[in-house]
Image (cartoon, coloured by chain):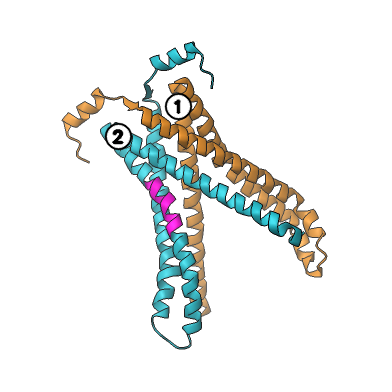
Chain colours: A orange, B cyan
Amino acid sequence: MTQDPFSENQDQLNFELELTDNAKAFLRETARWAKFLSIVGFVFLGLFVLLALSISSILSNIPYPGMMELRMMSGTLTVTYLLIAALYFFPTYYLFRFATKTIKAIDNYDSGLLTDGLENLKSTFKFMGILMAIVIGLYALLIVLGIIGALFAM
Amino acid sequence: MNQDPVYETQRELAQDLELPSLARPYLQEAAKWAKRLSILGFIILGLFVLISIIAPLALSSTGRSVMNEFASVSNTVSIFKIAQAILCFFPIFFLYRFATQTQKAIKTHDNDSLVFGLQSLKSFFKFFGMVAIIVFSIYVVLYLFMGPLIL
């Protein structure tokens, strides 16, 4: 907020932010946990896709008579699950790329790779942020519709 | 691992990996989105505490005799919910600290803040990694002990 010309000048002068050894160590550990998490994410994505593709056969093996309607819906369920999987693929993939590129960048002192890695970290957070905004927007819409519905029911 | 002398010398020479100026906007934007996410997280956590901890406690303190059984039930649940809220607080706090410290580091060119920010980012990911490991091992243990009963 306090943008006095002197500090602006100083900004231009010492423009380089150094990655100290501590910073590098923390960034490396971040990337290693991120890699672990992204691999866990990919495994779960795979299981989820498997569930999506096999849901119709799972439902047809349950011998309850009430399952008839559910069985009719199995195509919709498959498509919905595949859509959810597609949605979660992106942040997982960004996180994996952040992790692998950052580890490589630190090991090889490659600042270009570090830039790529941080770009993917940005993409991960941005994707999650936009997704959360959309989900909260939908919840807000549902609450407003619910209130309107309740008012009309009175 | 690969400790050949040439590699080691190269390491010594290129000891300081600078944060390239091209990477700075990405780090800044990552911090910006992380800040929004963490603030959202704090709001959701606050609503959770309000609805599932404070509201039942307020209800139980009204001392209605009919409510007593419900009150005792909701109080025992509250202990788990307090634990849940405390557990949820940490990653959100780490994310918020990463965001604010990184933004401060970039704005004021403060290396210490950058280190602190990256440490918080590490804690954030480590927390989820630990949770994943714990949940996974609980599943494995459950499966080993309960699997024969279920299947």
Is residue A72 in sight in this rendering? no
Q: Position of residue B151 (x, y in %)?
A: 77, 59
Q: Quadrant of residue B113 in the image?
A: top left
Q: Is residue A102 magenta?
A: no
Which sits in the foreground, B116 or B33?
Answer: B116
Reply above or below: B79 against B117.
Answer: below
Which sits in the foreground, B6 or B58?
Answer: B6
Q: Position of residue A106 (x, y in %)?
A: 46, 25
Q: Which mark is residue A70?
A: none
Q: Residue at x 45, y 69 (%)?
A: B52
Three-letter amino acid code at disc 1? Leu
Is residue B116 in sight in this rendering? yes
- Residue at the spot of label 1: A114
Mark nearest the camera among 1 and 2 is: 2
Reply above or below: A12 against B86.
Answer: above
Give the left or right position of residue B18, taking residue A97 as reference.
Answer: left
Q: Which mark is residue B112?
A: 2
